[in-house]
Image: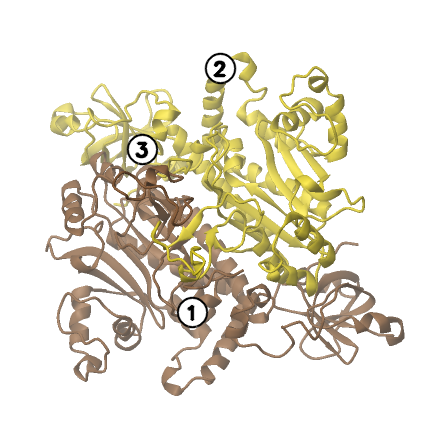
Chain colours: A yellow, B brown
C-alpha cells in the first residue's frame, strides 16, 4: 500500500472517502489519548487521526508526543469534530521516531520569532515557517514561469568575481590563502597571483554586467541567484546573503523596463495568491494578530491580503524624481519638520520615509520614480539630454519602500567612458564590458529585485531573517 | 509599430506573410551588398533581409558588417533562396551600432572553442554557444517544472557556511579580513571571532545537510544553486563553481531514491529534446563534425541525439557494488590488464574507466550501482545489516561516468554518531544535524546531480567550461 502525502489525501478526499489510506507524518498534537493531529509539510493542513481501542495501543500511545514521526493506516471517514471535513480512523499506528517531550523545543505553545531564529533546524516545522517556505517556493516558481513564458533565458552569472559591479565595495573576499600566511611580492603586498584564481576575487554583489553580455547575445535574459553584501547592517531589512532577480533586455528603453517590472511583479504575486491560498490566509491571520500587539502608530493601514490586492489592483504611478522632489518639498511632513531627513533641494537621495510618504500618503499607490540625478546613481545608467539626470527607476512599495531598482543602460561608448572616469571605474578591468558598446551596441535596460524582500512583502513577515531558511547576517552563519 | 523577435516572426510566419514587420537584431553575414542575415538570440534561426535599391542605401550599407546592430522594417515574403521559407524585403534599414570589421573578433569564419573561452563576452553570440545557453535554460526550467509538479519545495540553502558537509576540505574561505592583517588572539591564532560572521566561514560544497532539515519539515525539497570546490583540477570535467541539484525526500528509501533519479533525469532530458529541437539538432551536427576530427579510438559510439534517446529508452540497470566488482574482476580488460587501475579486490573505489566499462561494454545501458563499501562513502549514509556497506547509489552514464550520487541517509541516532566518530566529524559543530535524528527521525534519501555535467551530456559539449556562461577554474575568474 502506497503512502499518500496529506496534500494528496485532502485534494482527493471525495474519491478516498471510506477507503483505507496510509500516512507517514509528524505529530503536532495528541489530545485525550485519542486524537492525533499529523502534518507532513506538504500543506499547512493537518490530518486528524482518531485512535480507538485504547487497550491495543497502550504501549504505542506512550511514545506519541509532539514532534514524533508515526505511520498510520486507516479509513478516511467524514469527521465528527469541528475544523476538518475528514479524518482517519486508525487501524494501525507505528511509531517511527520518538520525540522526548522534555527535550523537544517545539511544544504546542507558541514560540517567539526570535526564539525560532536560534533554532533554524526546527522552525520550518511550525505553521508559520512552513507557510513562508511554501510561499517562497511558489514565488520562485512563478519567477521562472513568467520569464520562460515571455521568452527569456535563465543565465547563471558567476558568484565568484574579480570585478565590483557597483564600484561600491562591501564585498566578501574569496581565497584559499591561510589568513596571515598569504605569500607577498617584492613590494611586500599580498601576491594574489598565487591565490587560487590568480587574482583578488570576491563574492558578487550583482550579476548585471554579465547579464548585459547575455542580453547582447540572447536578447532577453534573467538571473536568479545569490548575491552578497558585507555591509555591517544589523537591521530587519538586510541580509549578507540574499537572492536577487535581474532581467536584462536588449532593445528595451526605460518605459519598457518599467512596464516589464510592473507586469512581472503583478504576475508573480497573483500566481502565488492563486496557488498558495491556504498559506496566505494563514499568514494574513498571523499578520493581523501581530499588528494587534503593536502600538497604534506602528500598525500598518492594510492587512496582508489587502496589501497584496492593493498592488494587484493599482496601475503603478510613474513620476520623475524632479516631480517627486517638488511634491516632497511642498509636503506637510517636510514643512512641519516631521521627516528625519528634511528635503531642502533637488539632488538629494530619497530616504525610506520619503518613499513611503509618496506611496502611502501622496499617491496611495505603488510608485515608479524615474530620471534620478546622475550623482546618486551608478556609472552604467544612461545620461539624459539634460546632462543632469540618468534613466534610472525605482519602484516603491507600501510598507517596504524600494522593491525594484533599474535603469536603461548607457549604450554610447563615449558617454560610458566619461561616466566610468567620473566614478573612478577601471576601464582596463572592464574592457569586456566596454566591448559590448564597441561592437553592435544597442539600447537595453534591466532591473534588480531583491527576492527576499518580495517574499517579505507577500508573507507579511516584517523581519527579512524570517523569509529565508538559513539567514546570514553579521556575526551569524550558523546551521 | 512593435518590434518582433525573430522567434516570434518564425512561429507566426503564416499569419505575418506579406505583412510589414519590424526587427532589431545583430548582423551575422552580409553578402553581395544585398543579403543580410540577422540574429537576435531568440532562436538559432536567422532571418534573411533582402536590400533592394542600392542607391538609397549606399551610405548605410557601408556601415553594415558582422556584429553590427540594425533595425529593419519590411515585408515578410516567401523566400526566393534556399535555406529559409521566408525573408524580409527591406523598406528601411537603420544602423543602431556599428562593428568595426578590423577589430571585431567574430568574423564569419569558425572559431576554436579555446579561442572563444578567452572571449566569454562574445561567445554567446555564436550559434554553438547560443544553442548551449538556450538548452541550459530549458534544462533549468524543466528541473523546476518537474519538482514543482511533483510537490517538492525549492529550498534556498546557504552559500556561506560554517560547516563542511562532506568533511572533505577543499573549500574556499570567505572573510572580510585583509589578508595578512587578520587580528590574532592570545595564542597567536587568527581570531575569527572578529571576522564578519564571528567564525571561520567557507563557500558551501553541498546543501544536503540543510536540505535534510527542509525535508524533515516540508517533506520533499530540492536545492538548485551554486556550489564550490577549491580542488586544483584543471580538467575538462571540473569547475570550481558549479550548479548542483539536490532533492531530499522524507520517507524515501534507496529504491525510491533511484526511481526518483531515473524519472527526473528522463523527464528533464525529454522536456529539453521536445522544446529545444532546433538547438539540439544543431548541436548534434556540431558534435558529429567534432567526432570526425578525432582519431577512431577516441570517437564515441553514439551521436548526440542517439545518446539522448539511449538514456530515454533504456530502463536503467541496477546492480550492487559487489556484483559490479565481480563483473569487473572477471572482465576482459581487467584480465588483459587494459585498465589503468586494475581491480584486485572488493572495497576499491570505481574509476571512470570501470564505470564506463559497465555502462558502455557490459550492460549497454545507464547503470545504477548501489550498496557501496562504507569506507569509500560519506558519514551520513545508512549502514546496511552487513555492517560493511552503506545505502549509497551512483548513476553512471555513457561517456560521462557518474551523473548522480546519492544515498539513503542514516536515520538512526546511535549509528550516525558512530559513523561521525569514525569519520572524525565534529558532533558539537553538527548538533543541529543530530537533532533531526533525536526528534521524530524518519527514513529519508536524496541525491546530488551536477547540473553542468547534465548540460554537457545534453549538448554534447565535452569540455564543461563550454556549458556555463562564465566558468571559474584554477587561475581563472575573468569576466
Q: Earlier in the sequence, mark 2 or mark 3?
A: 3
Question: Is disc 2 on the same chain as disc 1?
Answer: no
Mark 1 highlights which residue?
B308
> Where's residue A464, x and y in %?
47, 32
Say which chain tag 1 marks: B
Q: Nearer the viewer, mark 3 or mark 1?
A: 3
Q: Is residue A356 above or below residue B199?
A: above
Looking at the image, the residue that sits furthest to the bottom is B296
Going 62% across and 41% down the picture, which residue do you hit? Answer: A405
The quadrant holding residue B98 is bottom right
Q: Which residue is mark 3?
A: A122
- Residue holding disc 2: A292
Depth check, front residue: B129 or B310: B129
Q: Which residue corresponds to the image point at 63% horizontal and 50% vertical from the top-left?
A: A424
> Dot 2, how many residues are within 10 Å of its Cα: few (below 14), some (14-19), or many (20+)?
few
- Residue, x 49% and y 15% (percent of image)? A294
| Residue B226, x across and y down, in percent | 42, 53
Q: In the rendered structure, are the residues bearing label 2 and label 3 in contact, judged by CB atoms less than 8 Å apart?
A: no
Question: Which residue occupies 23% across, 79% down?
Answer: B339
Lateral position of residue B394 relative to residue B21, left or right: left
Q: Left or right: where does residue B220 sit relative to residue A450?
A: left
| Secondary structure of the residue carrying numbered label 2 | helix
Q: Quadrant where the N terminus of chain B lies?
A: bottom right
- x%, y% of residue A147? 58, 50
**How far apart in space, not on screen, are marks 2 and 3 (Cα)?**
26 Å
What subunit carries mark 3?
A: A
What is the secondary structure assignment of the residue under circle 3?
Answer: helix
Q: Quadrant of residue B415?
A: top left
Q: Chain of mark 2?
A: A
SS at circle 1: helix
Amino acid at each position: 500500500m502506497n503512502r499518500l502525502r496529506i496534500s494528496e489525501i485532502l485534494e482527493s478526499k471525495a474519491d478516498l472517502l471510506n477507503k483505507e489510506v496510509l500516512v507517514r507524518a509528524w505529530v503536532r498534537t495528541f489530545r485525550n489519548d485519542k486524537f492525533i493531529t499529523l502534518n507532513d509539510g506538504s500543506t499547512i493542513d493537518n490530518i486528524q487521526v482518531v485512535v480507538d481501542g485504547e487497550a491495543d495501543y497502550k504501549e504505542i500511545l506512550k511514545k506519541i508526543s509532539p514532534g514524533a514521526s508515526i505511520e498510520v493506516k486507516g479509513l478516511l471517514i467524514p469527521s465528527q469534530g469541528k475544523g476538518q471535513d475528514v479524518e482517519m480512523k486508525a487501524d494501525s499506528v507505528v511509531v517511527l521516531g520518538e520525540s522526548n517531550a522534555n527535550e523537544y523545543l517545539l511544544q504546542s505553545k507558541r514560540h517567539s520569532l526570535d526564539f525560532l531564529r536560534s533554532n533554524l533546524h526546527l522552525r520550518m516545522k511550525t505553521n508559520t515557517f512552513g507557510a513562508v517556505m511554501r510561499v517562497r517556493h511558489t514565488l520562485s516558481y512563478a519567477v521562472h514561469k513568467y520569464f520562460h513564458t515571455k521568452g527569456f533565458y535563465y543565465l547563471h552569472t558567476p558568484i565568484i568575481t574579480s570585478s565590483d559591479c557597483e564600484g561600491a565595495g562591501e564585498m566578501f573576499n574569496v581565497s584559499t590563502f591561510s589568513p596571515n600566511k598569504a605569500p607577498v611580492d617584492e613590494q611586500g603586498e599580498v601576491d594574489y597571483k598565487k591565490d587560487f584564481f590568480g587574482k583578488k576575487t570576491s563574492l558578487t554583489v550583482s550579476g548585471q554586467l554579465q547579464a548585459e553580455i547575455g542580453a547582447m547575445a540572447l536578447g532577453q535574459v534573467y538571473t536568479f541567484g545569490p548575491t552578497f553584501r558585507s555591509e555591517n547592517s544589523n537591521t530587519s531589512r538586510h541580509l549578507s546573503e540574499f537572492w536577487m532577480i535581474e532581467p536584462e533586455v536588449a532593445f528595451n528603453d526605460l518605459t519598457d523596463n518599467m512596464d516589464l517590472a510592473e507586469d512581472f511583479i503583478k504576475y508573480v504575486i497573483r500566481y502565488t495568491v492563486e496557488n498558495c491560498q491556504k498559506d496566505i490566509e494563514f499568514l494574513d491571520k498571523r499578520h493581523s494578530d501581530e499588528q494587534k500587539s503593536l502600538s497604534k502608530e506602528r500598525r500598518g493601514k492594510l492587512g496582508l491580503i489587502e496589501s497584496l490586492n492593493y498592488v494587484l489592483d493599482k496601475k503603478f504611478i510613474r513620476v520623475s524624481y524632479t516631480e517627486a522632489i517638488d511634491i516632497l518639498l511642498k509636503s506637510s511632513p517636510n514643512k512641519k519638520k516631521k521627516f528625519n531627513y528634511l528635503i531642502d533641494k533637488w539632488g538629494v537621495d530619497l530616504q525610506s520615509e520619503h518613499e513611503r510618504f509618496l506611496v502611502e500618503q501622496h499617491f496611495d499607490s505603488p510608485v515608479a520614480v524615474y530620471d534620478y540625478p546622475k550623482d546618486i546613481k551608478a556609472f552604467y545608467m544612461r545620461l539624459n539630454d539634460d546632462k543632469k539626470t540618468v534613466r534610472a527607476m525605482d519602484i516603491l512599495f507600501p510598507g517596504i519602500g524600494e522593491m525594484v531598482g533599474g535603469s536603461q543602460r548607457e549604450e554610447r561608448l563615449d558617454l560610458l567612458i566619461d561616466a566610468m572616469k567620473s566614478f573612478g571605474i577601471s576601464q582596463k578591468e572592464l574592457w569586456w564590458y566596454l566591448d559590448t558598446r564597441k561592437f553592435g551596441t544597442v539600447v537595453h535596460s534591466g532591473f534588480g529585485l531583491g527576492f527576499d524582500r518580495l517574499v517579505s512583502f507577500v508573507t507579511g513577515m516584517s523581519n527579512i531573517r524570517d523569509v529565508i531558511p538559513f539567514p546570514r547576517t553579521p556575526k551569524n552563519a550558523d546551521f
